[in-house]
Amino acid sequence: MKPALFALWAALLLSAAQAQSSLKFSEMYSKVTVRGIEFSPKLQGMSGKSVSMVGFMAPPLKPKLDFFVLTKAPMSSCPFCSTVADWPPDIVLVIMPDGKLLDPSTGALKVTGRLEYGIKKDDQTGFVSLVRLYADKVENQ
C-alpha cells in the first residue's frame, strides 16, 4: 500500500472512531442534589451525536419492542409496574428505528444511536424520559 493511500485510510478510520463515542452510565450526571440531577458536560457534549452505551434491557411489557429502557444493571421489575421511586435515575430510553422491532433480552446489550437529553414525554406511551438513544444498532454483548 502506498504511503499516501495508507495515510488517507488511517485518517478515515480515525474519523469514524471519533464520530462514534461511548458513554457509561456513571458519566451521565455530574451532580445529584435535592433539586434534581445535573447532566454531565460529557453527556451534554454528545447530544445529537452517535453514541454507544452498554447496559441491560428493563423487563418489557410486549413480546416485540419498538422501544425499551436501558439500565446499568439487570432489573426484575417492569417500568410500568412500579413507582417512580423504585427506578434508578440513570436509565436511558431506547427508541428503535421506524419499522424495526426487537426481541426482549436478559443479557448485556450495546446500543448505538443518536443521543438526546432533557425532559421529554412520549405522546403515545406517556413515558417521560431524561436521556434517549435513537438506536441505529442494538447488539448482544
Image (cartoon, rainbow, N blue to C red):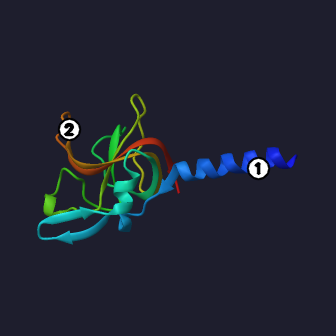
Up the image or down, 133 lies above or below 87; here it is: above
Label 1 neighbourhood size at 10 Å, few (<14), some (14-19), many (20+)? few
Report which quarter residue 55 is drawn in. bottom left
Furthest toward the top, the residue is: 99
Q: Is label 1 or label 2 in front? A: 1
Residue 113 higher or lower than 89, as above or below: above
The answer for how far apart the CA atoms under marks 1 and 2 are is: 49 Å
Kind of residue indicated by mark 2: Thr
Image quadrant in which you'd find residue 72 = bottom left
Residue furthest out toward the right? 1
Q: Position of residue 8 (x, y in %)?
A: 74, 45
Q: Residues within 10 Å of mark 2 (few under 14, many from 20)?
A: few
On residue 45, which mark appears?
A: none
**Can residue 99 be seen from the camera position used here?**
yes
Q: Which residue is pictured at 21% across the width and 70% down the height?
A: 32
| Residue at left offset 34%, top offset 62% | 41
- Asked whether, in this view, residue 113 is left or right of residue 117, the answer is right
Exactly how many numbered labels are in the figure?
2
Q: Three-letter amino acid code at disc 1?
A: Ala
* Residue 74 in view of the camera: no
- Across and down, in percent, residue 99 comes to 40, 28
- List the residue tagged with mark 1: 7
Q: Position of residue 31 (x, y in %)?
A: 25, 70
| Callout 2 secondary element | loop
Give the farthest residue toward the front: 4
- Of callouts 1 and 2, which one flags the residue occurring earlier in the amino acid sequence? 1
Q: Position of residue 33 (x, y in %)?
A: 16, 71
The structure residue drawn at horizontal position 30% and vertical position 41%, both measured from the top left corner, is 62
Name the residue beneath numbered marker 2.
125
Left or right, 121 with respect to 104, comes to left
Name the residue rendered at 33%, 41% in the picture: 67
Q: Secondary structure at mark 1?
A: helix
